[in-house]
Image (cartoon, rainbow, N blue to C red):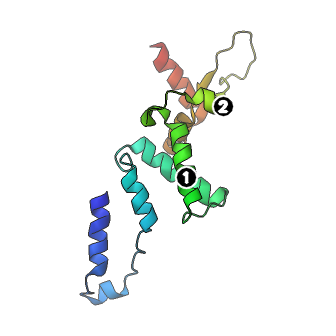
Amino acid sequence: MKQRAAAEMKQIKEPVKSLDQAVAPQQAAPDPRAEEWAEKNSWFGQDSAMTYTAFDLHEKLTKEEGFDPATDEYYAEVDRRMKLDFPHKFGNTETKETTKPTQTVASATRSVKPGRNTVRLTSSQVAIAKKLGVPLEEYAKQLKITKEA
């Protein structure tokens, strides 16, 4: 992925060779701060779950929470949330359950019975289900089936 970015930069610096290329819109140069962050995080572009979660965090931080992606605070927040979502990838022995509440998904029948079975999804499992377009209840149901098997 980093090599592709370097190749794209090389193409931008080459002179325009045809009218089609002159009319085509030029891609904006990548933010040097973003490139530096990607180099520091070797998992970026390699681990699809973490990469997609980072993209999702970017959308949430910039569009919903108003973070400016050109600030140190933005990158610090991305790093903090990635460590919360993937503590095992960063060597944290502290589990997500002790640092951030998990989402509980009710059973499909919606009946409240003594000893009802619930499945707790971690935020990374929620992110994966959303990326796949699977309802959380269905994801939890399948997760429960695979754990029982």
Amino acid type assigned to the residue bearing label 1 in the image: Ala
Q: Residue at position x 30%, y 70% from top?
A: 8
**Mark 2, secondary structure of its residue:** loop
How many marks can you see?
A: 2
Q: Residues within 10 Å of mark 2 (few under 14, many from 20)?
A: few
Q: Is residue 126 left or right of residue 48?
A: right
Q: Spot the residue most to the bottom.
A: 19
Viewer-side residue, 134 vs 121 = 121
Image quadrant for the N terminus? Answer: bottom left
Whether residue 93 is situated above or below residue 117 in the rendered picture: below
Q: Quadrant of residue 59?
A: bottom right
What residue is disc 2 on? 101
Viewer-side residue, 54 vs 68 = 68
Q: Residue at position x 43%, y 75% from top?
A: 28
Amino acid type assigned to the residue bearing label 2 in the image: Pro
Q: Which x, y percent locates residue 88?
A: 45, 31
Which sits earlier in the primary sequence, circle 2 or circle 1?
A: 1
Q: Is residue 13 left or right of residue 115?
A: left
Q: Which x, y percent locates residue 72?
A: 55, 60
Q: Is residue 118 left or right of residue 6?
A: right
Q: Which x, y percent locates residue 83?
A: 51, 40
Q: Residue at position x 26%, y 74% from top?
A: 10
What residue is disc 1 on? 76
Query: Marks 1 and 2: in contact by CB < 8 Å?
Result: no
**Mark 1, secondary structure of its residue:** helix
Residue 129 in view in this figure:
no
Q: Quadrant of residue 24?
A: bottom left
Residue 71 in view in this figure:
yes
Select label 2 or label 1 by which is in front.
Answer: 1
Whether residue 132 is situated above or below residue 72 in the rendered picture: above
